[in-house]
Amino acid sequence: MKRIIYIGADSAGYTLKEEVKAHLDSLGYKVEDMGCHSTESCHYPEYAVKVCKNVQANLEGSFGILICGTGIGMSMCANKHRGIRAAVCGDTYSAKMTRCHNDANLLCIGARVIGSCLALDIVDAFLGAEYEGGRHAIRVKMMEDIENS
């Protein structure tokens, strides 16, 4: 069963968000768009919060994707939320490995950093990878301990 994808972007990421959304729809994912809904200037933390709260409410059944100009601001906001492990990825290898080794549940992309074709490949690599557990579970638990301290 495919997970629900909560997606959000600021004005810099709006156009790429729409492309990613269409791509995910074509692959049969259920996609929930948390905004923004235009290229009009807005504040990215608002959309990071909306996506993260939805992922938090369904940690085992969902992923999040956040898109801004660089992906950095969104990832900083996302990682403030308990249970969220967000990674900015600009290549497919990092996207795959953050799922396999870090059990990342939220992907951040920089619309001004990468093109749409690469962005779609990154999304596919992230969603297609599985968490390996094993020795990586110790490190994920360590991250959770930091988060809870």
Image (cartoon, rainbow, N blue to C red):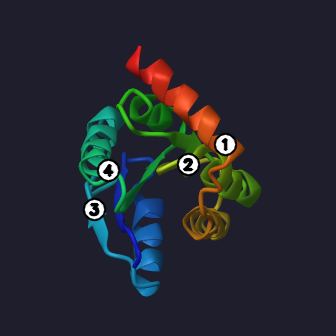
Amino acid carrying label 4: it is Val
Which residue is at 49% across, 36% downward?
75
Mark 2 element type: loop
Numbered disc 1: secondary structure: helix
Residue under pointer 2: 103
Label 3 environment density (alpha carbons within 10 Å; few <14, some 14–19, many ≥20):
some
SS category of the residue bearing label 4: helix
Side of 92 where 82 appears, left or right: left
- For mark 3, give the secondary structure: strand
- The numbered disc on residue 55 is 4
**Nearer mark to the viewer, of 1 and 2:** 1
Mark 1, mark 4: which one is toward the viewer?
1
Which residue lies at the image location 48% right of the left edge and 78% below the top edge?
23
Q: Is residue 90 visible?
A: no
Q: Amino acid at mark 3?
A: Asp
11 sits left or right of 38 in the view = right
The residue depicted at 48 percent of the width and 62 percent of the height is: 16
> Which quadrant would the N terminus be assigned to in this image?
bottom left
Disc on res. 136? 1
Q: Which residue is mark 3?
A: 33
Q: Residue 73 placed where, x, y %?
A: 47, 32
Which x, y percent locates residue 135?
70, 42
